[in-house]
Every structure is written in C-alpha cells, then in structure tokens.
Amino acid sequence: MFESAEIGHQLGKKAYKKAEPLLRQALLEAQFAMLANRHHAVVVLVNGVDGAGKGETVNLFNEWMDPRHIRTEAFAAPTTTLPAEEQRGRPAMWRFWQVLPPKGHVGILFGNWYTEPIVHHALGQDTKARFQAQLEEIRAFERMLVAEGVLLVKLWFHMTRDGVRQRLKALEKDPKTAWRVTPADWERLERYGPFIQASAKALRKTSTGEAPWLVIDGSDPNYRAITAGNYLLSYLQRAGLPPTATPHHAAPQPPAPLDGRSLMDSFDYQRQLSRKDYDNELERLQGRMNVLLRSPAMQKRSLVLVFEGMDAAGKGSTIRRITQAMDARHYRVVPIAAPNEAERAQPYLWRFWRYLPKWQHTVIFDRSWYGRVLVERVEGFCSEHAWTRAYDEINAFEEQQTQAGALVVKFWLAITPEEQLKRFEDRQITPHKAYKITPEDWRNRDKWPQYALAVDDMIDRTSTDIAPWHVVACNDKHWSRVEVLRLLCQRLEAVVGEGTGAKISSKKASNA
Amino acid sequence: MFESAEIGHQLGKKAYKKAEPLLRQALLEAQFAMLANRHHAVVVLVNGVDGAGKGETVNLFNEWMDPRHIRTEAFAAPTTTLPAEEQRGRPAMWRFWQVLPPKGHVGILFGNWYTEPIVHHALGQDTKARFQAQLEEIRAFERMLVAEGVLLVKLWFHMTRDGVRQRLKALEKDPKTAWRVTPADWERLERYGPFIQASAKALRKTSTGEAPWLVIDGSDPNYRAITAGNYLLSYLQRAGLPPTATPHHAAPQPPAPLDGRSLMDSFDYQRQLSRKDYDNELERLQGRMNVLLRSPAMQKRSLVLVFEGMDAAGKGSTIRRITQAMDARHYRVVPIAAPNEAERAQPYLWRFWRYLPKWQHTVIFDRSWYGRVLVERVEGFCSEHAWTRAYDEINAFEEQQTQAGALVVKFWLAITPEEQLKRFEDRQITPHKAYKITPEDWRNRDKWPQYALAVDDMIDRTSTDIAPWHVVACNDKHWSRVEVLRLLCQRLEAVVGEGTGAKISSKKASNA
C-alpha cells in the first residue's frame, strides 16, 4: 500500500515557491465556486503516520483557503468540541454526523472514523473479526455519503520507520525543538509495525472507486504540501459542478400485489374499548411504563419511538398518552416535516442523527426517516435511486442505534380510508380542529393505493429482528392508544428482564 | 421481512387463465429482444421455504420461455453438474462463476450463494460473525455483478409454518402424493424458526437498491406463478435496453507525482550475474522449488503465479525457467490477451476465475486480471468507473483465492525504457524473434509515462499482506530469472514452514 510513497519524493524550494501562490489562488477560487453552487460538500480525512505532516498540512489548508467556510475537527484529541458525556449512548458515528459540513462547505476531520479502529486493532484491543466488521461499516457509510453528494478526500501521510526515527532524532538534537519530542513519540515508534499493518489493511479494504485513498510521501514538507493541495484542489473543482452521470443498471421495482390486497387491509379494525376500560387500562399501563423506564436495566439504555401512519391516524394524541407518564427532563418529541434549507444541504439521515437520545433519554419521532420511502417515494420528492437504497441505509442506521444501547420501537398506526374520511370531515366542521386539515391532506388521500404499496414495502424491508414494526389498527382511538402502550411495555419488559415484577398480561392483542 | 407475504394472497383460476398466455407471450418477446441486444445477462436467484413453490416456478419459467437460452442450475443438490473433486481448493464462489450466463442469456440458480450461509447459520454450524462476513461478501459480489451488467432477480418464496404443516398433511393424505413427503420434510419443519430467523437477516442485509429481494407469498400456486413471472418479465424487458444513467459523483483521480518519479525509476537495474553463476544458481533453485512444491504442506494448497511487466521485460523466458522444473500434469500457463467475444459477454473477472487451480496445481498467468488497471486504463478500453472500482474487486478476488488455500505470488518484471529499446531493436533484426515485435509494442512504448503511473497505482493499491507484489529489475536476464526463482522459493518456504530442510540463503536481493 505504501510502496510508491517510500521512494523519497522531493520538491525543491524554488519549485515550491513557484507552485504555492498559484495553488492558493486556485483553491480560493474553487472554494468560492463550490460555495456559490452548493452541489456538494467536501470532507477531508487526514490520517497517517505521526510526524508525516498531518498537522502541518491541515494548518496550510486553513491558511490557503477562506477559513470561514472550513470546519476543522480533531477527534480523539483533547481539543474535541463534544464532551464525552454527550457521546454516551450515542452510536460511534454520532459525533462525526454532528460535524458534517453542509453543501458548499469543507470539513477537515483530523482524527476520524478510521482512527479508533486502526489503533485498537494495532494494539490488539480489537479482534480481527471486529476490525473487519468496522471496515465494512465504514465502506457502507462512505458509500452513502458519496451517494448523498459528499465528496471524500482521503489523505494518508506516510513515512518509513527509519524516516520517523531520523525525524525524532533531529528534533531532539536541536534545543529549539527538543521539547516537541515526548516519550509517547518513541513509544509509538515501537509500535510502528503493527500500526502500519493495520493501516495497510484498512486502506486496502476502504480504497473504493468512489472514495479512494491518496497515500502521500510525508518525508519532504514541500512535496507533501503541494501534492495534498493539488489533490484537494481537484476535489474542490469537482465539487463546484453538478453530479455527472454514469451508466447504471437500475433494478425494476417490486410490483403491486396482483390481488390488490395490502397489509393494511388485513387487520381487524373492529376492536373497541369502552370509555371505562380505556381509562383503567390507560392508567395501569402508564404507571407500568413509568416504572419500567426507571428500572436499573434502563440506566445504560435509551429509547427511540417512531410513529408513522396515514394522516389523521392519531399519531399526536397517542404520543401525548405516552408523554403524560414521562418525566419532561427525559424525553423529547420531534415532529418531522419537510426538510428546511439547512437540512437539505446535508445527507438525508443527518437531521435524524442530530436527535438521537443519550442514555436514560427518550426521543419520540412524530414521523421520521421513513419519510424517504413513504412521502418522498410516492410524491417523487427524491430520485428512485435515493429511495431504493434507503431501506438498506435505514436498517444500518437502526442497527447502529441498537448497538449503542437504544431500544427502537416503531409503530404504524393503521386506519381505513373510510375512517380517515370521517375524521377529515369532522376536522373541517370542528373549529378547534380545523387547522389540522389542509388541501395537502386531501391530495395525499387521493394517493391511498400508492401509499399502501409503499407501506407494505417499508414494513417488509425494515421490520427486522432488531427493530420490528408494530402495526396497530386505530379506527378506535381507545383501543389503539392502550394497544400502543401495551406493546411498548412489552418491549421494555424484554429489556428489563424477568426479575422486575409482575408481567403485563401477554394476551395476543397486536396485529403486527 | 415476510409480513406482507403472510396475508394469504390469492389469484382465482379464471384470472390466472387470462393472465398466463399474455405473460408467456411477453416473456418470449422480452427474451428474444435481450438475446438480440446483448446488453445484460439476467440471473434469477430462487430461494425460500421448502414447499413454497420454488421448483414449480422454475419449471414454469422453463416452460414459458425458450429453454435453449436459459441455464438452470441446482447447487447443493445431487444433480449438480460440477463434481465435488473439482471444487476442492477453489474459492466457494468458483462454482457459481462457472455457470454465469453470458449477456443476452438467462441463468436460473436454484440453490445458490445464499443457500449454504443461511442453512449453516440456522443449524448453528456457523457463528454470527462468520454469517455476517459471508453476507458482506455477497453484497460486494452482487454489487460487482450489477456494475458489470448482470441483472439480479432475487425471488424469495415464503410460507408460514402453519402453511407448510398443512401442505405436508394434505400431501400425505392423498395416496397419489403421499410419496412426496419424506421424514426430512418434517425435520425441516422442526427447524422452521431458526431457518426463518437466519433468512430474515440475510434478506435484510442483502436487499440493496441495486439488487432487492422480492418476497412472494407461496401459498397460492396461481398467485405466486404470475407474481414471479411478472417480476421476471420486468427484468427481461429492462435487460433488452442499454444501461440508463444516474447522477454519479466520481472521485477525481490521484495525480501523477510532482517530481515525475515513479517506483519503476527507483530500482537498481545494474545487478548482473555471470553465465556460470547463473547456471549454478538456476539449477539449485529449480531443484529447491521442485522439492518445495511436492512437500506435504502443499497437498491442500495451490499456487497462482502472476507475471506482469512492460513489453520485452522477459515474462515468457522467465516463466519457462520455472516450468522447466515442474511436472507438466500439475501446471498450466495461461497467456492473457484481449478478451474474445465470449469473454466480453461476461463480468470482467470471469475469464480468470475459470483458470483457478485446484489443490496441488499451479496456474501461471502471463499477464492477468491486472490488465484492467494497466492496458485498459491507459488505452481507455474500459470506463473510468470500471477501472477505479477494479482495485477493490481484484483485492477481494485474491483474498478469496487465498482463503481457499492458494498461494498467490505476483511479479512485476521491471526494465528501463533504454533496455526495452535495445530489446525491440534486437527483435527486429533477429529473424526468429521478429514475430515478437509489432507496431502495437511501439505504440505502447510511446505511453511509457502513463503506464508508469498506472503501475505505481496498481502496486500501491494491490500489494497487500495476503498477496504482495514482487518487483524485480530485469535489465539483466540472468539476474532476474534467478531472483524470481529465489523469491518464489522464499514464498513457498513460508508456507512449507521450518521443518522441511535447509533454507535458501536469505540474502536481501529483492528490490521489492
């Protein structure tokens, strides 16, 4: 992996002095063009051997370009802007999502998603299988970023073991620089072999067509600076242009069922609950949920609730029945509507990553990331390419949440078209509900069959062992609210385990 | 994953009788159009619950279409056309590569790369980590197939546990069909739970945007037949059309080194060996290699040698010095030139997969799969998209060979441009060598700098821990032939281990 970076590339002082001002000018021009056009974001990953010029190059980049539109982050270094406490319970990738630059901007990640996997594997803290799995996750993550319009500039600064040793000795020899050499530097040199081995594997596995690594010989400062700068320039220039087209062999989409029947038709919408039973059950289950949430088993867990359903299915009122029994300091309801400008400048999942709860917290999504395979698919708000790959990306997203300790509970609130019509009409004639009904609701209603197909596909492809869908028939609001609470308690109980008290009756009441 | 396939879809006899002849006609038309245009191959994967109609559907497909252009393969079944002996030492995917249909054709794989991973995991024979790794390999493999123009129709036939039980009981009850039910069927029903769990995970992980699964309710024969047929039809129709274009954010290519220096310049081309030393060393090393190849440690290993180099670098003559000391029954030299028509109708790596050796055998590639990132890249014979993803695909290919027990040894035979010129001129004036020099050789020579850059990239990105490149300076043929043999013996010794006799002198003679 490092062969051609070990032959001692050099650039003379004169050549550097000639190249540098031209490069600066070109970088600035490209930076402003990409800012004006906002087609792409550029993320620069800076990795490599310590002492091979990572820090110096990042400083040069900030000097050469307009730093107002660059965000430089150094993860795993003491200067990190995100307190460790905030990161507890969040998936490992969460902190990187927080600092992704919007379209038009440049982000420099100095220490990033490669740092920990490589170091842990080199130190023998992670097994080969774990390392392999991490690299696969990175591949999938980067593929998604590129598909969402993020250009990845992956710079690896290389230096031979002898090169590092000579550099440290030279620094120590000069009284003015001796302070820069610490015992940790010599210790790292001891581990050069395993570090380079782990790095070579990481580079091999993640040097893909869409996001290759550039290995830069770091031994000569002039050479590495202009090489890295030129490469960055080529990306900035590309980022100012719209995406180009390549031949693509799109898979035909799954057909609608021949018999016109969908999952939504298959539920029993007749169930009801009397007012009295409703009041009793609601109170009992709310109390139960509250106890479960405060159990010791939930100390290192978080709860993510997702509510989806046709308009007027009762998402808001159901959510209120849940939050009534929660401590306001520990939950947050996030209503999801069309993305705003800042959200459109980011990869699709970005706005949901922002809200992931830390330990002991609950986030309730009133509509969610499933918008991509529901409204965006049906209304054509995104390309077919975008929503067809979304199922896979969503499953990976929920898997990461689960791995970080989140319990992900997803509800589809199902109503019949007839019931929806009744509720729409009721809203129109009831003054305090009139604000809830818009022409858009009627337009969506016209596309009921397309939505039904999209819902079937969504449930088939994202109801997983780690995060199953619970489909609840909601024609009767009493019955459905109690049912949602009952299912939620059931999922919580599975986490909390046996030893925590009487179980909720396990009568099969779910439709899912 | 199976929710919408469990609601009991049905298609009445009348509707079936109306749909079937139309579907047949459309399938035939689409089949002939794709055969005429040869844009794509179609591979149909047939998986699912036993008894849910897999075999019946495959039979229908063969009945409905022209079976001359369909190849149906049932792997892991006694009817497999590939003897087990042939598969020993070949990577697990080898047998599937053997039956990939060429462009224009349809291949039906009934039992395929999903079968073993799912069954082994369900039976607890494979760990979760191994299962996960296999699914990741499948994702990469299928992505490559799709990028190479293969459309994947992934059909999953589903049936509930109760559905399977009722079917078996019904079959047993009727004297005419009772013979079809074996004890194995009832045993499989016992394992329905773990099987479905493993399957759901496999489907979740491999239902990608470019190759999604279609889950088909298998309980009603009419419904499943027309559903599967319609879906296949949509693929055949797509296969008759050229690839469509989607927005793509191609990464800029790595730049040429600023100082114009390449790996190729960095070697010591001055080494020489006298005729006498050459004769002695050659004989000694040939004998050594022969002993090593016949050692017990090589009984379950194979050897893959790759020779690449500029024209006139001496590939042919070096290879002859190796084969002189081999048993003709155990080696094969495969010269690689431009692909022929049959090879162009297949994914790029197909023609190399064909030649992979079984245990105790050696295959020597005189040029190889590296053509894609050398001549095809430089001459523009393939798209940028194709060669940029090739590094990753090649690394995965060699990893699979290694995992199957192959020792992969790759040589780049390096000469200087001056030496090449001397050899070209010598060939022109020597009658028995004149056939070796063509106008194309001179044209390639004009592109020396582009080739040098391509070689550097190739070595950087494909010299891996599992299959490193050995670069040998070949200006002196005596020295280089001995050096190649020495390196080869060194690699063989590493496999054979310590206890097998005196080591070859370990003087550092390699340039790599």
Image: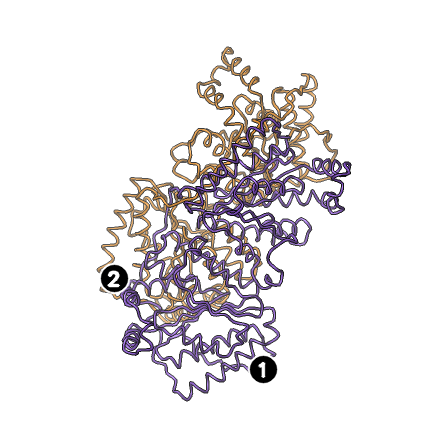
Chain colours: A purple, B orange
What residue lies at 51% left-to-right and 76% top-to-bottom? A490
Residue under circle 1?
A: A501
Identified by mark 2, the residue type is Tyr
Relative to the observer, which residue lies in front, A112 or A101?
A101
Residue under circle 2?
A: B16
Identified by mark 1, the residue type is Gly
Indicate the position of residue A279 as horizontal and vertical percent values.
Answer: 44, 86
Residue B362 falls in image quadrant:
top right
Residue B419 falls in image quadrant:
top right
Indicate the position of residue B219 as horizontal and vertical percent values.
Answer: 35, 66
As drawn, is B501 to the left or to the right of A454? Answer: right
Indicate the position of residue A282 as horizontal and vertical percent values.
Answer: 46, 83
Gap between marks 1 and 2 measured at Cα:
55 Å
Q: Is residue A107 in view from this perspective?
A: yes
As drawn, is A389 to the left or to the right of B331? Answer: left
Pick the quarter of the image with the C terminus of chain B: top right
